[in-house]
Image: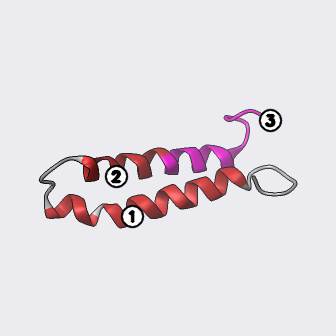
Amino acid sequence: MGLLGNRRMLIGAIFMIIGTILLLPAVLPNIGELFTYALLPGAALLVYGTWLVGTSESGPAV
């Protein structure tokens, strides 16, 4: 089944992209405090998205 055919995989991929975008400002020097607060939700979305993609197919998790 392709990426667009499986809703769970698509949602997981979207969460992974959003989580990565939220983590990117952390590599910049002199980031503001607002971007520091984005690290925890970014990491949580990245982990949850990875879990959704890894468990979207039947069989053992990847």
Q: Are marks 2 and 3 in contact (CB under 8 Å)?
A: no
Q: Are marks 2 and 1 in contact (CB under 8 Å)?
A: yes
Q: Residue at x 50, y 55 (%)?
A: 46
Q: Is residue 5 left or right of residue 34?
A: right
Query: What type is the residue that disc 3 sits on?
Result: Met
- Please provide the residue range marked out in magenta: 2-16
Few, some or many C-alpha atoms within 10 Å of disc 3 (few <14, some 14-19, many ≥20)? Answer: few
Query: What type is the residue that disc 1 sits on?
Result: Pro
Few, some or many C-alpha atoms within 10 Å of disc 2 (few <14, some 14-19, many ≥20)? Answer: many
* Residue designated by label 1: 41
- Where residue 33 sits: x, y (%)? 15, 64
* Residue designated by label 2: 22
For label 1, the SS is helix
Q: Residue at x 34, y 52 (%)?
A: 22
Q: Are marks 3 and 1 in contact (CB under 8 Å)?
A: no
Which numbered mark, 2 or 3, is in the foreground of this view? Answer: 2
- Where residue 28 sits: x, y (%)? 21, 47
Q: Quadrant of residue 31?
A: bottom left
Q: Is residue 59 left or right of residue 41?
A: right
- Where residue 35 sits: x, y (%)? 22, 58
Q: Residue at x 72, y 42 (%)?
A: 6
* Residue designated by label 3: 1
Q: Quadrant of residue 37?
A: bottom left
Query: What type is the residue that disc 2 sits on?
Result: Leu
For label 2, the SS is helix
* Residue 4 lies in the magenta-colored region: yes
Work out whether mark 2 precedes mark 3 in sequence or the reverse, and give the earlier one: 3
How many numbered circles are shown? Answer: 3
* Residue 38 lies in the magenta-colored region: no
